[in-house]
Amino acid sequence: MTTALPPLLPVAEIQKRLGEIFPEGTPNRGYCTREIAARTVFVMLYVGAVETLGVYIRPNQVTRMTDVQAGCATEEERLAWAKRSLSRDGSKEGRNISGRWYAVDTREPIRDETLKDGLVATGAVLVKADVATTSGIPRYTMAKSFVGLLDPNLTGGALNEAVATWQGENLSAGALARIQLIGKGAIAGTGGVTVTFPNGQTRRLAHGPSSVISKAVIEEFAKRFLGKPGVIFLSESGNKVPGTDDQLANLIGLKIPSDKYLPDILPVDLGPKNPLIVFVEVVANDGPIGSLRKSALLEITRSAGFPDEHVAFVTAYLDRSKAAFKKTVPELAWNSFAWFASEPDHIIVFREGSSDRKARLSDLL
C-alpha cells in the first residue's frame, strides 16, 4: 500500500500562489515568493513532505530535482525519487545528476533563507524537533493548512477566502496591518484620500501612495512622536500650492517661502516650551531630505530665529521593503529620521557623531 501523495502544481503556479499568500508587507517576503521558494515547495509536494504524512525533506533534495524528473508524476515515480534523493552528495547518484535545478552549495540559502527565515518563520513549514540545523537528517515538512492552499482544485473566490483565513491564523497582527496599508498605497483610483488634521479639519487629497503616506504622517506619526501636534501646511505632488495654517505659522513666527525648498508637510510640536518645527518629505519614489536640502531648510528656520536644536527632519516612506527606501537611504541626511507608514510605532534615527561626541551603544538604547 502506497502513501497518498498530495497533488502537484506546476512551479509557475506555485510561485503565483505564494505571491498571493505572502503579499507585499510580509516580513522577508522575497524569501517566500521567489522561484527557489516555489521549487522548494514543489519538491516538498513531490515527496509528500506534509505534517500529516510524517515525511520530511532536507535542503539538498531541492538541488537534486530536474525538469525531467518533475515531469515524472506517477506516485511510484515520486516515491522512488524521494528515496534516491536522500543519497549522499558524494555517492554516484549524488554526483551524476544531469540538469539538476541547483548546485550542491545552494542548499545553504535554501536552508537559511527560503526555509528558516521565510517559510518556517511564517508557519508554512514546520521543523522536526531536536534535529540540528546542519544535520543530514530530513527535518522540514509543510503544515497541513498551508498545503491546502496549494490544491489545484482550489481556485477563484474559494482560494481567496482560504488564503485570507490562513493569513489571519498565521501572520502577526503587525504583519497583517502592514500588508493592508501597503495594499491601500498600491491601489490606483479616483476616490481620493481624506486627511484629518490635529485641529479636526479635513482635506481631500488625490489618490495615490504619496497621499496615503501624507495621511499617515498627519494622523499617525504626529500623535505618536509629537506631544501637542499641529500642521502648518500640507502640499501635494499634484498641487504645489499648500494648504496653509497661516495663523499657526504666525503664532510661532515662521515665514515659509513658496519656493523649490518647500517640504511636503510641516508639522509642529507645541508641547515643549520652545516649539519643535518638523520638516517632512514624503517619498513614494524619490526626493528624501538629504544634506543639501537639510541645509536649505535650516536657513529658513534660522532666519526666523529658531535654533537648530528646535528643528527636526523626517523622510516618510510607505514601507522599508519598498524600492523607494532602498534607493534613497544612502542620501538621507545625518541627524534626520526615517519613518514608515506601515510600521507607525517605529522610527530610524540617523545620528551624526564626531570625534568629540562619542557614545557607547548602551547610551543609545
Image (cartoon, rainbow, N blue to C red):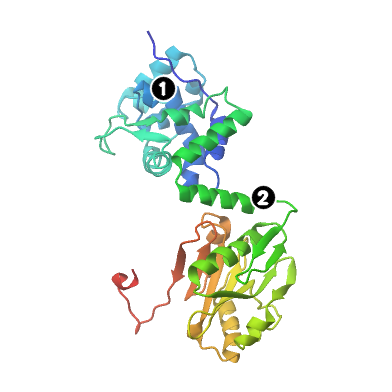
- Determine which residue is flagged by label 2: 187
Q: How many numbered marks have been drawn onto this rendered protein structure?
A: 2
Image location of residue 149, percent across then percent down: 51, 30
Q: Is mark 2 on a helix, strand or loop?
A: loop
> Dot 1, how many residues are within 10 Å of its Cα: few (below 14), some (14-19), or many (20+)?
many
Q: Is residue 364 visible?
A: yes
Q: In which quarter of the image is the N terminus?
A: top left
Q: Which amino acid does label 2 sit on?
A: Ile
Q: Residue at the location (52% across, 68% down)?
A: 223
In the current view of this chain or complex, which residue is farthest to the front? 200
| Vertical placement of residue 24 versus 242, above or below | above
Residue 208, how many percent across, how many down?
Answer: 68, 57
- In the figure, is residue 301 to the left or right of 31? right
Disc 1, SS: loop
Residue 144 in which image quadrant: top left
Q: Label for residue 332? A: none
Q: Residue 48 carries which label?
A: 1
Q: Please provide percent x and percent y for residue 241.
A: 74, 74
- For the point 56% across and 92% down, which residue is it? 305
